[in-house]
Amino acid sequence: MHLGLRLLFAFFVINGLAAFFVLRVFMAEVKPSVRKVTEDTLVETAYALAAVASDDLASGDLRRSADSSRFARQMRAYAQQSVKVWIWDTPKRSLDMRITVTDDQGLVLFDSAGTDQGADYSRWRDVNRTLRGEYGARTTRQVQDDEATSVMYVSAPIMVDGRIAGVLTASKPARSVQKIIDSAESKMLRGGLLFLLLSAGVGFAVTWWLVLHVRRLRNYAQQVQAPTLHEAASPAAAQPRLQAPSIPGELGELARAMENMRSRLEGRDYIEGYVRALTHELKSPVAAMRGAGELLLEDLPEADRQLFAQQVVDQCGRLQNLVDQLLRLSQLEQRSQLHAQAACSLRECAGQAMSQVEAAARQRRIELTLQGQGGSGPWEHDLVVLAISNLLSNAIDFSPEDSHIHVELEGTRISVRDHGPGVPKALLGRLGERFFTTPRPNGERSGTGLGLSIVLRIMALHGGSMQVALAHPGLRVTLDWR
């Protein structure tokens, strides 16, 4: 399962459980809370009406003729009133409270509903406890299995001359407050649903944000691996260097830690690759120098001594050239930006590069020709000259004597074409790979294999490209500085 789905699932489970338990607690508390408030109101009502009824009970009016007593008339007037009110958002269309009065024996003297006058209430819990001087209340269902038919009864003592002369009971059916309970529960359900929807939106947004940044880190980690030996040897094969993604918080710290780790790994792999490749390249000249030196220790004819001494000098020159090229390439690979300060003319750089290799070309009777004006751009002059001179040096090495090398300028492009043997098509992709060389026309393999590597690195710094194509005869190398 993907990380995003796991996070989203976990978020929904946590929020769902939290919402379930919170709503369950609220829903479980709604009904008891409403009934507590109702009971509290009934208690105050019962005690207030008990005080009102005490005079009629003391005078005996409620005993002689309950219907004609003042209290009875007032209560019947209350019961016959019609109401149309809104309690917050709940309508009320009737008065549902029932009032009964019993004597000190529990016999009903007055019933506002007019149904139980004369009945014996002494066994009812509310009346019985109140007659004993305790708090009396009860809830009774009219239909045993239907909670909606339950009625709440609260009794208060009617005091006459400091003694309990009777009991007044105020009762209220559950259906009269059920609307309030239903309204509250409905609001809670709607609020809970809205909460779940909002939490789902927040969960999706947070998960998307987190997964997006984790994916950026993952992609960065996949692409910032230290270069392999083949990538280090061939700049064209390496991926462009990526910057660590800018992410806030701990993920940003992780990205920076990965960047530091990557720099260290790159340096280690870079050094390992250089050491391996350099060791391989040094084996041949060192072996040749050692063999020549051992022979020079013996008595040799003058001609042989000069031959071996010259071989030592040649191999030393080859080693010096290799070291110089490696140092130059290493400096370029450590750079990440140009130092260009003004516009650079491509034709001027080509002319300067041609003057640097003119002596080597004249030695082999090779003619250099320059055609076109070329453009200008924000390039680093010395690096442009170095790249062109390396192309020209390669072209001179591979060109036969009494041939010519053609340099053509067009906009931001410069092409160098020789008339040598070219390169097998299968090897074109390896040109520019560090230490890769092909035989010269004379059969020698005298190059370091670093010239085109330097060119590729220079082009990478400028954001340009190098294309190599067979010219039949020869080879054409084009640099596009863009």
Image: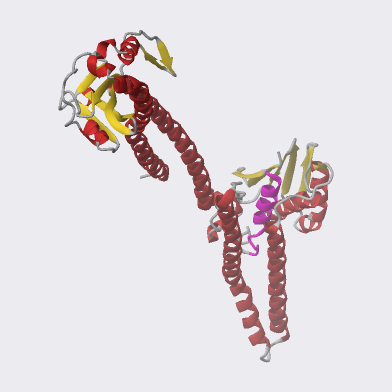
Q: Position of residue 456 (x, y in %)?
A: 65, 51
Q: 381 or 161: nearer the eye? A: 161
**Image vertical order of residue 157 relative to residue 252, above or below:** above
Which residue is found at the position 27% from the left and 34% from the top? 136
**Image vertical order of residue 302 relative to residue 445, above or below:** below
Q: Position of residue 331 (x, y in %)?
A: 71, 60
Which residue is found at the position 80% from the left and 49% from the top? 381
The rendered magenta stretch, by its main secondary structure, is classed as: helix
Quarter of the C terminus within the rendering: top right
Q: Position of residue 33 (x, y in %)?
A: 36, 33
Q: Which residues are magenta?
A: 446-463
Residue 106 in the figure: left or right of residue 177: left
How many marks the image carries: the answer is 0
Which picture quadrant has residue 157? top left
Residue 348 in the figure: left or right of residue 119: right
Which picture quadrant has residue 99? top left
Q: Is residue 447 magenta?
A: yes
Q: Is residue 239 visible?
A: no
Q: Hey, which residue is sitting farthest bottom in the picture? A: 299
Q: 215 or 412: nearer the eye? A: 215
Q: 43 or 130: nearer the eye? A: 130
Q: Position of residue 94 (x, y in %)?
A: 33, 12
Q: Is residue 9 magenta?
A: no
Quarter of the N terminus within the rendering: top left
Which picture quadrant has residue 32? top left
Q: Is residue 85 visible?
A: yes
